Amino acid sequence: MTRYPDELRTRLADELAAARRRTQVLADAVDDAELTRQHSPLMSPLHWDVAHIANMEDLWLVRRASPGDEPAPGVREDIDHLYDAFINPRADRPALPLLDPAEARAYQATVRERSLEILDAAGADGRPLLEEGFVYGMIAQHEQQHVETMLATHQLRTGPRVLHADPPPASGLAAELVGTEVFHPGGRFTMGVDAVGPDVFALDNERPAHEVDVAPFHLDAVPTTNGEYARFIDDGGYTRRELWSDAGWEHVTAEGWTAPMTWELVDGAWHRTSFGEREPIAAVADQPVLHVCFHEAAAYARWAGKRLPTEVEWEYAARVDPESGRTRRFPWGDEEPTAELANLDQRHLQPAPVGAYPKGASPLGVHQLIGDVWEWCDSGFEGYPGFAPFPYKEYSEVFFGGDFRMLRGSSFGVGTVAARTTFRNWDLPIRRQIFSGFRCARSAGDA
Ligand code: AVJ
Ligand code: FE
């Protein structure tokens, strides 16, 4: 039994701890009544997420990362069925005999103690799941993904503000960048990634690295802003049938949507409510628009004479260094994101104005591909050539070919451990409770 090298062991423990700190911030911000309430049928009660996070860690670290060829006993195998997302649709979760908040917190703590003992004792020992610490990274990412979901639940709750963060940095470049696009010559590039070295935490749907051809295209330098989106609304965007797909039109008219999720008209002026605080859209006009569904993004793009990018185009723009032709890890190079490069980790509770992260831009000048808002792409969810489910089919494979649209980049609510240009997120085209925005694209040659 060989232990992981100290540096790796520390990194893995740090990622688990960082995820747990965020879970606790969001769970501790509300009282037990709010923790156990379902704020929207689209979301779980927060204490379900808390125990589900622990149950995933119980399944994959306590049971599967333990030394030996057979899974070790779990902390609470008796409650697996309550926290299986496939057995229990979100709308049904409040009616289950769930752990109460104190029990859910205690379950998290007990499981974590056991995980850290296992991490301390052993290394990979040739087991693929444990190679380079993958399963610890997977569990840290799983917790961070649920923290982002819990943050979206917070966005849906009503009542006074309970979460606080510094405002995002200002931008001196917004006026210059809004409405501009960047030409990308296209060609062949390496899409996806092999989960080795710095990319070891890449999840199954990001793999393997493979060559792809992309035709020349233009991509907006920045995500579509609130100010631009308000002009689309004022121009009758939500009432002009020709801008919408059949499914999009059917959905917005059935729902009566006339603006993004958190917007409302107050004395004739658009306002949004962000984590309990109402503010005029005019004050955040340069921020990327947030909480729009795929259909709204696509309708805006058509109104603007453009379209949404494909996943291939998005990843090309985010990764290819035109100078060397090399596919890199991030728009700015190969180094991990920092507070100067991207708006991540819930450091700010809203997107930053466009142009606020000039150091994070791509060499061709595309800004904020990582951080701020998830970006809808006009692609469905499929496995890459050579895809293999790892370590379980229910993370990705069962969703392939479904009615999903892809989201790329990451939002202000994404944990750095899951912020990659190869990361593939997906949701139904009607969903907008997530931290979703978009930027437009155009094929080269189209007027
Ligand atoms: C990748 C965000 C679509 O939340 O449904 C969490 C992530 N998978 N637990 C989701 C996930 C299992 C997943 N998304
Ligand atoms: Fe989950």
Image (tube, grey):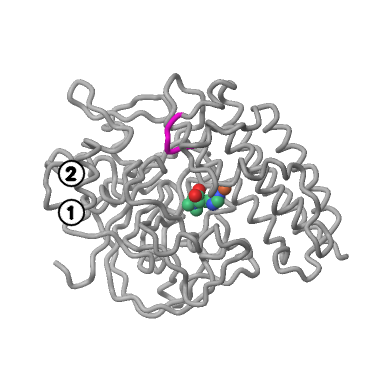
**Mark 1 surroundings: few (<14), some (14-19) or many (≥20) residues within 10 A:** some
Residue bearing mark 1:
304
Q: Where is residue 49 in the image (x, y as percent from the top left)?
A: 58, 38
Residue bearing mark 2:
232
Identify the image quadrant of the C terminus.
Answer: bottom left
Residue type highlighted by circle 2? Phe
Q: Position of residue 443 (x, y in %)?
A: 23, 69
Instruction: Give the quadrant of residue 198.
Output: bottom right
Residue occupying image coordinates x 70% and y 51%: 59
Instruction: Give the quadrant of residue 11.
Output: bottom right
**Is 288 positioned to the left or the right of 8 in the image?**
left
Give SS at disc 2. helix
Residue occupying image coordinates x 32% and y 57%: 221
In the image, which residues are magenta? 39-43
Q: Where is residue 312 in the image (x, y as percent from the top left)?
A: 38, 69
Whether residue 338 can be seen here: no
Position of residue 138 relative to residue 110, above or below, is below
Q: Position of residue 429 (x, y in %)?
A: 33, 51
